[in-house]
Image (cartoon, helix red, strand yellow):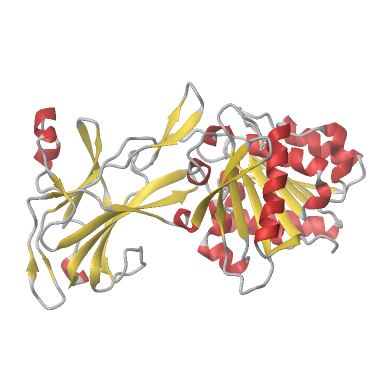
């Protein structure tokens, strides 16, 4: 996947903007500290949005509780450093809170939350190398200036500080809930993956396997979560409240493909390993993937359809000769009509072949840039039509020129659609 907002960033707190914009020698002489005065620590807050991970806020921890009414968007200034240059971030909202987390409305507490404009072109955290076609997460480097005094809850003043503070860490929303894992086979082949574990209370839970696209290959074991919401959307708190599930997101190696014999074997081993180690319901195992991962999804289900309860291949392509294996498997295929990277014929041909093999196919099209309600309703209309036709094979094609950001990014309207996500969990093997 190509992410267009990629920059190198750095983080801390400074007093004067001209000290940021100064010469290289001046920047090199700056001394950073972990904490100073009333400030205990500073953390970046990042979130994976449909277009990829962005720095969405900054959390500053003070020694004393801060009166939220003493804060405004002019209290601080935030800059992202790009080498010797600095670029200002737009502050949208500032408030105090009792924890280093975003809130609809602030409350008095030891933390000051500075929410940033996610439309800033410097908000993204990934760098896309056009030569290799690979995304990389870069070090985050920011500076923040407290330009005005603020007030504690007991009325004491907290003056601005002339010292620069380097961030103590990062808070990566939802991503931090995925643990890093790896499996290996007897031949020494290995597969990195991230795993989200729901609260099970001893009850068996579904498993969602997400296969990333070609741009997320590597060894970092993180960009498969950061470049888009293909994995994150299933672990989002709102989604988990409706459909609790384990979420596994493996990462293929550079120059590797999900359709290789080795990777298919490792993916099957991963599923079996997770079934052995966790309370996973074998009748509710689902797979979804995008682009290269869409191809991997097709490859898995066309050869191992009995393993899965349902699948969502996005902008991929499969082997039409094996379409007969998919007649009885619930599938929802989605693709942009004008996809310039993986031609839409890949999905059309698979759907047509499954229909020829005996499945009842329900087709529909709508704009990929509808708002959330409109997209949910459009998908629901297609689902209702499928129900009337006793069909479990659905195909959605997003109209030309409507897929956000890039014609290839059909995963955006797919994973932001509540109807599509909820449909997955309605499918149980044997029912």
Looking at the image, the residue that sits furthest to the front is 186
Residue 89, percent from left and from top: 26, 45
Quarter-of-image position of residue 60:
bottom left
Does 23 sit left or right of 354 as displayed? left
**Residue drawn 75% across the image and 57% down it:** 383
Residue 407, percent from left and from top: 57, 34
Identify which residue, 356 or 219, lies in the foreground: 219
Residue 193 vertical placement versus 381 (above, below) = above
**Residue drawn 36% across the image and 66% down it:** 103
Residue 106, percent from left and from top: 29, 69
Query: How many numbered circles are shown?
Result: 0
Identify which residue, 232 or 34, lies in the foreground: 34
Residue 414, percent from left and from top: 62, 48
Looking at the image, the residue that sits furthest to the top is 131
Residue 73 vertical placement versus 126 (above, below) = below
Residue 50 vertical placement versus 21 (above, below) = below
Identify which residue, 361 or 330, lies in the foreground: 330
């Amino acid at each position: 996947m190509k992410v267009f907002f990629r920059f190198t960033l750095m983080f801390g707190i400074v007093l004067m903007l001209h000290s940021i914009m100064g010469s290289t020698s001046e920047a090199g002489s700056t001394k950073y500290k972990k904490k100073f005065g009333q400030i205990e620590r500073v953390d970046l807050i990042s979130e994976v949005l449909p277009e990829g991970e962005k720095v969405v806020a900054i959390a500053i921890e003070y020694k004393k509780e801060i009166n939220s009414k003493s804060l405004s968007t002019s209290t601080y200034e935030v800059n992202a450093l790009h080498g010797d240059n600095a670029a200002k971030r737009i502050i949208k909202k500032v408030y105090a809170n009792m924890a280093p987390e975003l809130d609809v409305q602030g409350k008095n507490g030891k933390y000051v939350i500075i929410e940033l404009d996610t439309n800033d072109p410097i908000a993204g955290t990934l760098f896309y190398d056009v030569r290799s076609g690979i995304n990389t997460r870069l070090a985050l480097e920011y500076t923040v200036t407290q330009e005005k005094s603020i007030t504690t809850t007991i009325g004491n003043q907290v003056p601005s500080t002339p010292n620069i503070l380097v961030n103590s860490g990062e808070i990566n929303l939802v991503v931090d809930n995925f643990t890093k894992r790896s499996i290996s086979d007897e031949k020494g082949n290995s597969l990195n993956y991230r795993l989200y574990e729901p609260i099970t209370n001893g009850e068996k839970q579904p498993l969602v396997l997400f296969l990333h696209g070609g741009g997320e290959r590597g060894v970092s074991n993180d960009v498969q979560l950061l470049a888009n919401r293909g994995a994150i959307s299933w672990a989002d708190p709102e989604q988990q409240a409706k459909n609790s599930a384990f979420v596994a997101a493996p990462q293929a190696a550079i120059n590797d493909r999900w359709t290789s014999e080795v990777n298919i074997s490792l993916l099957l081993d991963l599923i079996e390993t997770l079934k052995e180690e966790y309370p996973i319901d074998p009748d509710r195992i689902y797979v979804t993937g995008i682009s290269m991962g869409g191809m991997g999804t097709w490859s898995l289900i066309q050869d191992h359809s009995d393993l899965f309860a349902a699948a969502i291949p996005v902008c991929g392509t499969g082997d039409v000769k094996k379409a007969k294996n998919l007649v009885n498997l619930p599938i929802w295929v989605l693709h942009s009509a004008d996809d310039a990277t993986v031609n839409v014929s890949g999905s059309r041909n698979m759907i047509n072949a499954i229909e020829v093999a005996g499945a009842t196919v329900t087709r529909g099209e709508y704009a990929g840039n509808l708002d959330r309600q409109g997209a949910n309703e459009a998908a629901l209309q297609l689902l209702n039509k499928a129900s009337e036709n006793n069909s479990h094979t659905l195909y959605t094609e997003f109209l030309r020129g409507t897929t956000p950001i890039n014609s290839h990014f059909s995963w955006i309207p797919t994973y932001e659609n509540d109807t599509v996500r909820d449909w997955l969990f309605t499918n149980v093997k044997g029912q």
